[in-house]
Image: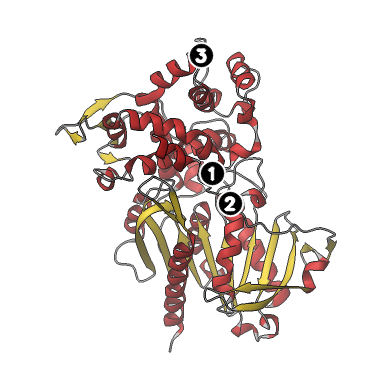
Amino acid sequence: MKKFMFWLSASIVLLLVFSGCSNAFLQGDGAVVNPASASRVVTYSDYYGTEHTMLKTETGVLDSGSRYTIFFPPGWQQLPDNQKKLMIYAHGYVTKDMDFSETDEYSLINEAKDAFLVQNFAVAFADYVDTGWAVKDGSLQTINLRNYIVKKFGKPGRIYLTGVSEGALIAVKLAEQNPDLFSGVLAVAGPIGGAGLEFKYILDVRLAFDHFYKKALTTAARSGDEPSKLLAAALGYDLTGTESTEGTTAQRWRRRFFPWHHHNTNTTIKVIDVHPELLDQSYRKSTAFITALAPLLGELFAQDTDKALEFASVGVNAKPLFPIINWLKNPSFIPEFVFTVSTALWYNIYGTGDLLEKTGGKMPLGTDGDVYTYLKFNNGFPRLFPVVFNVERFSANRTAANYLKQWYQPVGGLTIPVVTLHFTRDPAVPFIHELVYTRIEGFPSSMLTQIPKAGFGHGTELTFLSDMTPVFHTDETLGYISDAFSLLVLKVEALSAP
């Protein structure tokens, strides 16, 4: 257990941050541009350690309110338009009321951009005006950024779009609906099987966790165990014995999550009094949440590994919820499972309110008719027949479900090259999304190339040492992304070859 606690104390946040933009003025060309950025010269290093001079030509704000950054390699603006190459990056999920510049992904872009700049690509990205599930606004801002660059600097001969996580779904959406705007798309770790599939996964993890651990966690919290009280508060568990069952399903679920959304309930006020840190902005970063709450999950799972394996074996309608086959007799089972469950619970806690606001307070998902099962384990060995267990039953609202369909359920029919990259044990977006999109697009497809990467991680590969210390393989992951992007370029060029 001490080793596990040491693992949880390891740093998991990259510390590179862009400088902000200030003293802006209106250019009259569709954006507010930072004047100092137009002449600021900075350097970057490629993977071989060679330094290059780079002109950071623009940071600013589009007319829509989206803040953008564009990096140009030397001489890019002087090239003929047909020789210019541009890579636009669509970012992932940002918690409600949080700024994209405060996320770990924002820092990671600083590292990732070098791989493109050294190949003479201009690199551009913009934040979204909306937060939370922002496929609608993210698609709009990505198009706005692309059109702004084309208007001001000319239309590059090649315009590529790269998206990670939620940004990958945005990229696939634009590839399907606006193929004339981009030459090709790279989608990394994306929920490309559809928004409904992703949110149902998050919901099912929460329901299964409640079944296996709610009673024990609530008992420990009521007995005064501080970590248990914190996690129980984060999950909205009733610690007073006065939990209300009134209202619609959506209202009940709303009361369970994110205390800042329902200050007026007596139960929530008592919880906040005990743990005001749940309102702190830092917990809205998944890494901070996992670091703070994973020790308790680690203890829960390590104390009874058979129970943890039973939780990990949960299936919904005969489909496994987790990649348990990869975890059986795997020394990394506990830390990987902790990371996976913590990530899903974070999305459940901090994303449910945002989703309900966007669906008009209606539940877009349901559990009616679903069959939930798990395997019984004895000393690490499963029994043959699954056990059925019950969860809360409710129906999806049709209008709310249509929101997820619109934003977004991929439909296939690609007409430009799309390359996807996905770790097979992704803790946030299950690999099943890739298999579902294969079926949606149809196999084989001349426009779709999918690269499954055996490993654990969401966007960045993560392994664990024998003492359970985490190792983030950032350089290796950037290499995977660079290789996948190079393959995309080859496919695009092959289409235009005589």
Q: Position of residue 279 (x, y in %)?
A: 64, 30
Mark 3 highlights which residue? 243
Tell me which residue sits at (48%, 18%) in the image. 221
Mark 1 to mark 2 CA distance (whole Å): 8 Å
Do the numbered discs 1 and 2 sit on residues whose CB atoms are within 8 Å? Answer: yes
Three-letter amino acid code of the residue under disc 3: Glu
- Residue 339: name its quadrant: top left
Tell me, for residue 104, which label it has, or none. Answer: 2
Q: Residues within 10 Å of mark 3 (few under 14, many from 20)?
A: some
- Left or right: residue 72 compared with residue 352: right
Mark 1 to mark 3 CA distance (whole Å): 30 Å
> Looking at the image, is 292 positioned above or below residue 211?
below
Mark 1 highlights which residue? 287
Q: Position of residue 301 (x, y in %)?
A: 35, 32
Do the numbered discs 3 and 2 sit on residues whose CB atoms are within 8 Å? Answer: no
Q: Position of residue 220 (x, y in %)?
A: 44, 18
- Left or right: residue 375 compared with residue 102: left
Three-letter amino acid code of the residue under disc 2: Asp
Tell me which residue sits at (49%, 55%) in the image. 169
Whichever of callouts 1 and 2 sits on the residue coming sooner in the sequence is 2
Mark 1 vs mark 3, foreground winner is 1
* Local secondary structure at mark 3: loop
